[in-house]
């Protein structure tokens, strides 16, 4: 399926922001407009990939249906693979295919990028 075909089938995006102190979620439309209130839960003290995924599952359960997931992550991410996570359980986050783990859990397409990169993508308008 091409990117344009995927965009045509995506109406609601579950947006997740993983932070050192909390994990936040809201629903967006394909144009990036916020469709729901932000919900947040504390980041687990032992913030392993499994523990963070459990919090994402709890947040997603409060959001209703969605077609795709966008995740901002506080560490070095390359092609959906977390290479480092200095604000989380550091030793647990080396070469973790976290985008695939989330996708496998929800059976939805996932885009996982560094949280600062995600913020930058949110302000890009048009081409560039």
Image (spheres, rainbow, N blue to C red):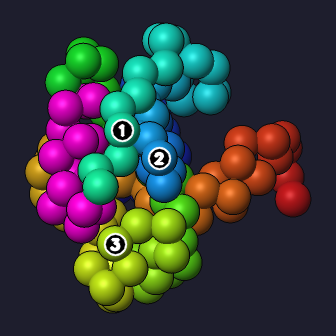
In primary-sequence order, the first of circles 3 and 2 is 2
Secondary structure of residue under mark 1? strand
Secondary structure of residue under mark 3? loop
Q: State which quadrant residue 9 falls in.
A: top left
- In the image, the segment drawn in magenta is 46-60
Secondary structure of residue under mark 2? loop
- Relative side of 119 to 59, left or right: right
- Residue 53 horizontal/vertical position (percent): 21, 52
User: Which disc is residue 89 wearing?
Assistant: 3
- Residue 103 horizontal/vertical position (percent): 22, 55
Q: Which residue is mark 1?
A: 42
Relative to 5, say whether 63 is above or below.
above
- Residue 35 horizontal/vertical position (percent): 51, 12
Do tag 1 and tag 2 residues touch (Cβ < 8 Å)? yes
- Relative side of 87 to 62, left or right: right
Which residue sits at x=25%, y=62%? 46
């Amino acid at each position: 399926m091409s990117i344009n075909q995927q965009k045509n089938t995506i109406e609601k995006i579950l947006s997740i922001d993983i932070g050192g102190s909390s994990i936040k979620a809201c629903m967006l439309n394909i144009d990036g407009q916020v469709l729901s209130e932000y919900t947040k839960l504390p980041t687990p003290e032992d913030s392993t990939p499994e523990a963070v995924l459990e919090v994402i599952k709890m947040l997603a359960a409060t959001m209703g249906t969605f077609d795709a997931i966008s995740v901002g992550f506080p560490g070095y991410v390359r092609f959906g693979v977390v290479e480092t996570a200095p604000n989380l359980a550091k030793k647990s986050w080396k070469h973790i295919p976290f985008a695939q783990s989330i996708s496998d859990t929800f059976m939805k397409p996932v885009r996982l990028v560094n949280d600062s990169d995600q913020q930058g993508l949110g302000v890009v308008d048009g081409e560039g």
